Image (cartoon, rainbow, N blue to C red):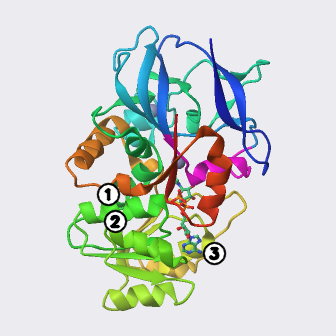
Amino acid sequence: MNKVQAVLSKGKGTPVSLETILVPDPGPGEVLVKVQACGVCHTDLHYREGAIGDDFPYFLGHEAAGVVEKIGDDVDNVAPGDFVIVAWRAPCATCRSCLRGRPWYCFDSRNAAQPMTLEDGTPLSPALGIGAFAELTLVAAGQAVKVDPKADAKAAGLIGCGIMAGLGAAINTGGVSRGDSVAVFGCGGVGDAAIAGAKLAGAHTVIAVDIDDRKLEWAKGFGATHTVNSREVDAVEAIQGITGGNGADVCIEAVGLPQTYEQAFFARDLAGTVVLVGVPSPEMKIELPMIEVFGRGGQLKSSWYGDCLPTRDFPMYIDLYMQGRLDLDGFVSESIGIGDVEEAFHKMERGEVLRSVVVM
Ligand SMILES: NC(=O)c1ccc[n+]([C@@H]2O[C@H](COP(=O)([O-])OP(=O)(O)OC[C@H]3O[C@@H](n4cnc5c(N)ncnc54)[C@H](O)[C@@H]3O)[C@@H](O)[C@H]2O)c1
Ligand SMILES: [Zn+2]
Ligand SMILES: [Zn+2]
């Protein structure tokens, strides 16, 4: 048993706190990871706002890279000392989706079997089955994905959630390809990664939409060819204007709000694709004219984790990063300590950062 300090959310809307937790040594099929860096994602904030569930206490942090400390029995994909990114999808290979050859939708993704707990034995709910704002975390072997150890841990960890979600929303879910026009609503870490993904995939026009000029400026650095401040102008009209009156081939919603989803829906060209990667809260509703849903054709899709397959995608994106073709460092706005997560949430809310990254 290992005793470490961890960032916990103990109740809806209350500030996170640093607590001592117990992390078991790995059992069969489990891996103990020494976390080196872990990004602060908006999903962590959703947890602490009670927007994802009511299973407090949550053990936050899920965008992590580190080194395998120990492995349990029957683990053959990693060895102690390997540099890994922790994934929140580890396909089971036996659920109905995996059996249909679609492991990126796996309905029974693997997590550690043993719980991490408070000192009194209270089990923790690890964010997205990870929990990584701590020196150590226990995960299922399949969640530990080996990548090039020369990559900087701060940048690599981000591939473990938000940046992968954005890249994959464009490339995997949206199927962006050469010559496409793409509009991205919300230019936080996820949206900017969608912009970077659209650029990598060869999009011709990449329109960044946000309500914050600072975010729009950063979005240009990741490949936005046009920017729209939707607080100042009508986003749908602006996108139609930029795309010859037609709308964009692929519209990616990376905020998680009904109004931005509706903008994405109406800013799309005929037969185009809408991708929802932003996470809504349970009470949100959208209302759309059904005739438009029918008449515009195309596809309305949701993107869980960018429809990624971590073992296929993580090493590939890390290699692109090492080749200088994907700017992961650009997402790291600041390095912070493990006690600074609550303040990082406020910086995120004020729009001051793309990613604050906790360095252990
Ligand atoms: N689907 C997935 O697998 C997945 C994975 C990670 C994160 N997410 C979700 O993606 C969303 C974005 O995450 P993030 O970390 O980039 O968050 P973030 O807070 O860094 O970025 C959100 C951006 O949206 C902008 N915004 C807010 N209201 C807006 C509006 N009305 N119109 C246009 N822009 C607006 C903000 O200015 C900000 O730039 C969150 O909902 C998060 O939970 C989804
Ligand atoms: Zn499965
Ligand atoms: Zn995340």
Please tell me whether residue 188 belongs to the stretch shown in magenta: no
Whether tag 2 and tag 3 are in contact, CB under 8 A, the answer is no
Region of the chain picked out in magenta, as a range: 38-53
Which residue is the site of mark 3?
A: 287
Which residue is the site of mark 2?
A: 222
Q: Is residue 174 above or below residue 19?
A: below
Whether tag 2 and tag 1 are in contact, CB under 8 A, the answer is no
Q: Is residue 283 above or below residue 137?
A: below
Residue at point 33%, 34% (across, down):
311
Tell me if residue 280 can be seen. Answer: no
- Which percent across, then down, holds residue 168? 37, 53
Could you say which quadrant of the image residue 261 lies in? Answer: bottom right
Tell me if residue 320 can be seen. Answer: yes
As helix, strand or loop, the secondary structure at mark 3 comes to: loop
Which residue is the site of mark 1?
A: 171
- Which percent across, then down, holds residue 348? 59, 60
Could you say which quadrant of the image residue 85 lies in? Answer: top left
Give the side of residue 313 with respect to residue 359, left or right.
left
Please tell me whether residue 43 belongs to the stretch shown in magenta: yes
Q: CA gap, disc 1 to disc 3?
A: 27 Å
Q: Amino acid at mark 2?
A: Phe
